[in-house]
Amino acid sequence: MNKPSPIAGWIPIKLYPEDQSLLCRWLYAGDKAFDEPFFDESISVCRSLFSENWHVKRSMSSTDVLADWAKEMDNIKPTAFIFHISRCGSTLISQMLGMQPSNIILPEVPFFDELLRYGKMHNCMPAILPQLQAAVSLYGANRTGKYEQLFIKTDSWHIHFYKELRALYPDVPFFLLYRKPDEVLRSQQKKRGMQALPNLLEADIFDFDKDKISTMHLDEYMGMVIESYLTAFLEILQKDKAAYAVNYHDGAMEIVDTIASVTGLQISEEEKLLMQKRAGFHAKFPEQVFSEEKPEAPVPEFLKRSFELYESIEQMKLKAF
């Protein structure tokens, strides 16, 4: 009988650049399901839940060991990646998929983002990608012995790391979730995310001019971000047969059904009823019934190109399905 790995239940959560090497901090997650809306919330729960995380000293290692340690684990390979343009239902979709006990859901894992951005900013992506793949394997460890699928919801800007992620996972379905540009903008106006604030994320990720965007109005800047996402979506859909466009307005259950159809995911009638019930509540505040305003307003000039891209994606989607 094989002995359990000494790192069973542990995941790397924070990157620490140090001189010429990279260190990472580890967290004990046990067999806890990652069922919070965002992964940083799961990290907070694990910190308070398990005594292994209460020590004053941090559990640290070099990232060089990730690949070897990942080999010790029974890992679930990624079933699908869910890319999105923000505020378009990706959080709800991932939570609905998470209602199926056989699914591991990884929603916007900070450690994955840190690795990708470090590789980009330090021009060392070839060295970082094997570490990212190993990190995905560690997060996808079959910690309960009952998992069968692994769904990864990316940060919205990770669509600009498409080439790197596709190189690691050439056959895994990529779902591209989008929504009308003005609706995304209105949501960001209420509460702006990292991607909506100039230079909070590195401008090079979007191929933006750092000096130019520093003086832009926040709405105009977000318009550029949305346009960059939809441009990438359209280019990917034109060449990648394993990429699938899904529109927020298709409806949450319909999107889950599309994902299930493509990936071969089996959903029981009981699970479907639970998912349909969950779809009626707010993604980030599960106790609140979901509702949204739909004001009529003219499309600003800076969003017109985004709407053209949106319509082109819609046409491709209709042809595909």
Image (cartoon, helix red, strand yellow):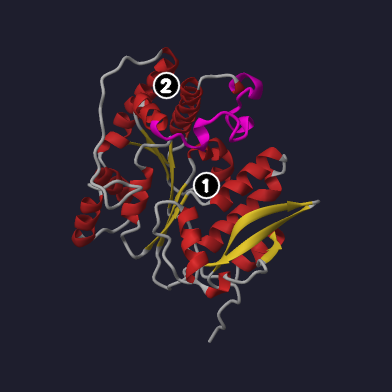
> Magenta stretch: residue 249 in it?
no
Residue 128 visible in the picture: yes
- Work out whether residue 75 can be spotted: no
Identify the secondary structure beneath mark 1: loop
Amino acid type indicated by mark 2: Ser
Is 197 or 310 nearer to us in this picture?
Answer: 197
Residue 237 at x, y percent in the picture: 43, 32
User: What residue does disc 1 label?
Assistant: 170
Residue labelled with disc 2: 306
**For mark 2, does the 10 Å Cα neighbourhood hold few (<14), some (14 to 19), or many (20 or more) residues?**
many
Q: Name above or below for residue 57 compared with residue 35.
A: below
Stretch in magenta:
190-213
Q: How many marks?
A: 2
Residue 319 occupies quadrant: top left
Between 234 and 109, the one lying in front of the other is 109
- Residue at 55 percent across and 70 percent down: it is 73
Q: Residue at x 40, y 64 (%)?
A: 148
In-image side of 108 versus 119 (left or right):
left
Mark 2 or mark 1: name the one nearer the start of the chain.
1
Q: Residue at x 59, y 55 (%)?
A: 133
How far across and down, in percent of the image, does residue 211 sit?
65, 21
Q: Residue 100's image quarter?
A: bottom left
Q: Amino acid at mark 1?
A: Pro
Which residue is at a point 29% across and 43% down the rendered structure image? 255
Where 217 falls versus 131 (above or below)? above
Tag 2's secondary structure? helix
The CA span between labels 2 and 1 is: 28 Å
Q: Measuring from the top left, give residue 226's x and y in whole percent.
A: 46, 27
| Relative height, residue 119 to residue 58 (above, below) | above
The quadrant of the image that shows the C terminus is top left
Q: Quadrant of residue 204?
A: top right
Above or below residue 65? Residue 153 is: above
